[in-house]
Image: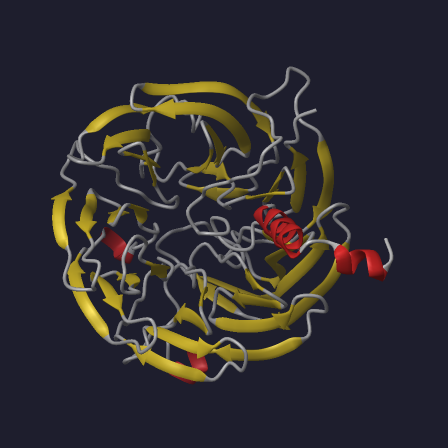
Amino acid sequence: MNRSVICRVPLLFLLLLASALHANDWPQWMGPNRDDEWTEDGIVTAVPEAGLEVKWRATLGLGYAGPAVANHHVYVLDYQLADGAVAANPGMKDELKGQERVVCLDSTTGDTLWTHAYDQPYAISYGSGPRTTPTIDGDRVYALGAEGRLSCLNADSGDVVWEHDLKSEYGAQTPHWGHSAHPLVQGDLLISLAGGDGSAVIAFDKQSGKEVWRALSAKDVGYCPPTMAAGVSTPQLMIWLPDAVHTLNPESGEVLWSVPLVPDFGMSIAAPAQHDGLAFFSGVRNKSLLLKLDPAGAAPEVLWEGKGSTSISSAHSSPLIADDTIYGNDEKGWLRAVDLKTGDRLWETLEATALERPANYATAFVVRNGAHWYLFNDSGDLIIAQMNRDGYKELGRFHVLAPTGEAMGRPVVWSHPAFADRCIFARNDKEIVCVSLERK
């Protein structure tokens, strides 16, 4: 098509085309809107008898960091271990030497397009690499390493635009299990957890890297990513630190309100599940609550708190809300459905995590596409299922890759996959795999 013909294409068509192309991307953790909603069509809704097509595999180093996919590129962090050993002991910090990397691959072939590497010693528990999914925004890639190296890179070349070392610049103590809170782009800002006195949360100008504001104090910032409140008229930035849920004005860092929520072991991890002005926060040892957010930013109403046999105690995976029901993976491996209004459990199953009995921190990441759910469990299996208030029905599973890590004596893969280009992109400590989910 020549240039004169392109100029005659209606503007509306170009806008619709751009929107469709964007919908195929998974540019950050939990997808375009950080809600684990996958909107692509033309995908399989059951696992075929012959299985699924593995399009490519590519070698990768250590890491819990999930991939992001944008503009037919895959971005992921890993760790190239040079010295030391991973003990997989929750009470012990691994002393490691090696290089942390941001890797960019071609999403159609798996070929490496560029890498950005730097020396990075580790002193963290479960030191098997970086934890955060890169955040892609236009021609920029934002990546946060396990020891607090925050990088802004050119998405096409990997060239450094700006960088910050949160530990040295802000006196931020690395969390026991490493920095895990995925950076958030909000307007002109890049927002990240850091730590230290008055700098638990920092907003940078996303173009220049210059600090715009800092807020809150925390020796341990936990692991929950910054999250914008949905369904409110006044922008509200929700930050769950191990002491409380705090909400800030995202433009200034001013604290609007705080509600205590203290999970055991400082494990504020799961992002809040949101629906129609409600926000559900969930943590280990039966620590959860449902908030009704005030549209104007006043203090929220606590509708209910999880107790014992109610609610969901999330560990690594974040719950979702659909049809007045909260769906999520409990810290003991149960996949549960909970009534949104009351917190009462409707059903539970260990089928998704392939367990005969409950196991600490057994995990299944849950993604929804219309009437179907796509679960990736820590055995490396992709499960297609239907879930509603009445129960769970599995429509098949496919083994994507091996669980190369270890936790509580079990082999695991703890990495949230990406769903883009009618494929699933998943990684372990040895490789990244692309499996087609396109309906033939």
Q: Looking at the image, which residue is at 26% across and 46% down?
A: 282
Residue 55 visible in the snapshot: yes
Q: Is residue 178 left or right of residue 297?
A: right
Depth order, front residue of 107/193: 107
Against 92, is 43 above or below? above
56 with respect to 149 (left or right):
right
Residue 259 position (above or below residue 202): above
- Percent of width and height locating residue 238: 29, 61
- Seen in the image, is 368 located left or right of residue 171? right
Judged from this view, the residue extending furthest toward the right is 2
Which residue is found at the position 47% from the left and 74% from the top?
Answer: 188
* Colouring scheme, one of rainbow, by chain, secondary structure, one colour: secondary structure
Residue drawn where x is 64% and y is 15% of the image: 49
Residue at 54 percent of width and 70 percent of height? 121
Q: How many callouts does the rendering have? A: 0
Is residue 172 shown above or below 145?
below
Percent of width and height locating residue 185? 46, 66
Give percent across and percent down for residue 83. 60, 63
Q: Quadrant of residue 356?
A: top left
Residue 388: x and y, percent? 34, 24
Q: Nearer the viewer, residue 387 or 428?
A: 387
129 lies left or right of 323: right
Say above or below: 349 vs 215.
above
